[in-house]
Image (spheres, rainbow, N blue to C red):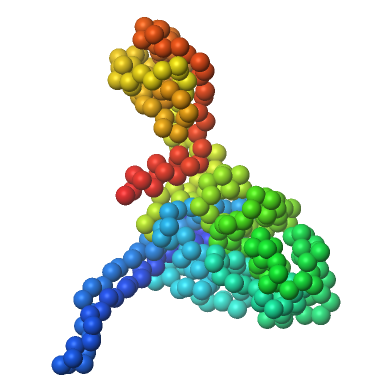
Amino acid sequence: MTMNDSYLVEAEDINKTFYTRHFLQLDEDTRQRRWYKMNTVHAAESISFGIRPGEVFGLLGPNGAGKTTAVKMISGLIRPDSGRVLVDGMDVEKKRKQILRKIGVVLEGTRTSIWPLTPLENLVYYGNLRNVRGKILKDRSHELLDFIGLKEKKNVEVRKLSRGQKQKLAICIAMISDPMVLLLDEPTTGLDVQSARAIKDKIIEMTRGQGRCVLVTTHDMHVAQELCDRIGIIDKGKLVACQPTPDLLGLFSEEMYLYRLDRQPEPGEFSGINGVLSVEIDPEAEGPNILVQLDLSPAARSEAFYGLAERLRGLGCELRAIEHRQQNLERVFLKLTTSTI
């Protein structure tokens, strides 16, 4: 990847390998243990991408693909074996202290806040750790809690808050030093619809309205498609795609139509129709149906529609509805990741 001055975050050919050893039981004679198996896990292999100010970048991948490892390398929690990460033009390994002031991190499954304290007390505590002091810390703490929707919970012990409220507080803690880079690892996992919606709205406001750049990892394809300007898909430590969201959705542009019928025909009964690329049954659709992929050419597609109608009439099937299936991120994700298995 060619370095670009417009990026706030740049990952350049970062690599990270982990080794795990499994041991035998203690030998009674030698009093030694011999390791019998060593697994090598390539969590990141030559990963390169950049994130611009005002941009939400999504990093998607199956469990164990390397998403969290990438986030930890950007934040300085893990050192890459090779390659480098730049934040605001500074190397994370060489300028760790300066970069920590520019980054806010929310990692999945970590208890960031101190539960016996209130949200306001948490922000004061973490603000002092991040060298934010006095009136600036006080004002910023109140502003963040108001902004995220915890105004009425400022003085309530964290242990009494809901999971969604704790997640909002974790984002406030990450922002207490006013970072320009926010790394959010699964920010909406396990949240109710209202809480997830509120956090998504705040992420958009923080980027579009305040010029920050945000990296989001998520398993929720709907969240990624709605939030992210660009998306990188990582699988088995490799970045298999990295494009603007509309371009990524267009990678597998296809004409798919669901025909809803009164009875279930066999897909093989539609062979030989010009313009029809494939016919299958959609198990997720209710009732008898066929899911048809048509040629992208308008002329061939028109011929396919007529041919399908004639074939259905000949089979004695009643055509009840035709639905155009839009491409979505989930289908793209599955095609990219399953193709590398």
Residue 47 position, x and y percent, is 43, 59
Answer with left or right where residue 279 lies relative to residue 179: left
- Up the image or down, 23 lies above or below 295; here it is below
Q: Nearer the viewer, residue 168 or 236?
A: 168
Residue 238 position, x and y percent, is 39, 56
Q: Nearer the viewer, residue 5 or 73?
A: 73
- Up the image or down, 221 lies above or below 287; here it is below
> How many numbered discs?
0
Instruction: Give the image quarter of residue 302.
Output: top left
Question: Residue at (51%, 74%) from the top-left corner?
Answer: 77
Q: Nearer the viewer, residue 81 or 58?
A: 58
Question: Residue at (79%, 69%) from the top-left corner?
Answer: 154
Question: Residue at (21%, 76%) from the top-left corner?
Answer: 36
Question: Residue at (33%, 20%) from the top-left corner?
Answer: 266
Residue 190 position, x and y percent, is 58, 57
- Up the image or down, 103 lies above or below 247; here it is below
Answer with left or right where residue 175 lies relative to residue 312: right
Residue 171 position, x and y percent, is 66, 64
Instruction: Please say whether residue 182 is visible from this viewpoint.
Output: yes
| Extreme residue in the left direction | 29
Instruction: Please say whether residue 200 is visible from this viewpoint.
Output: no
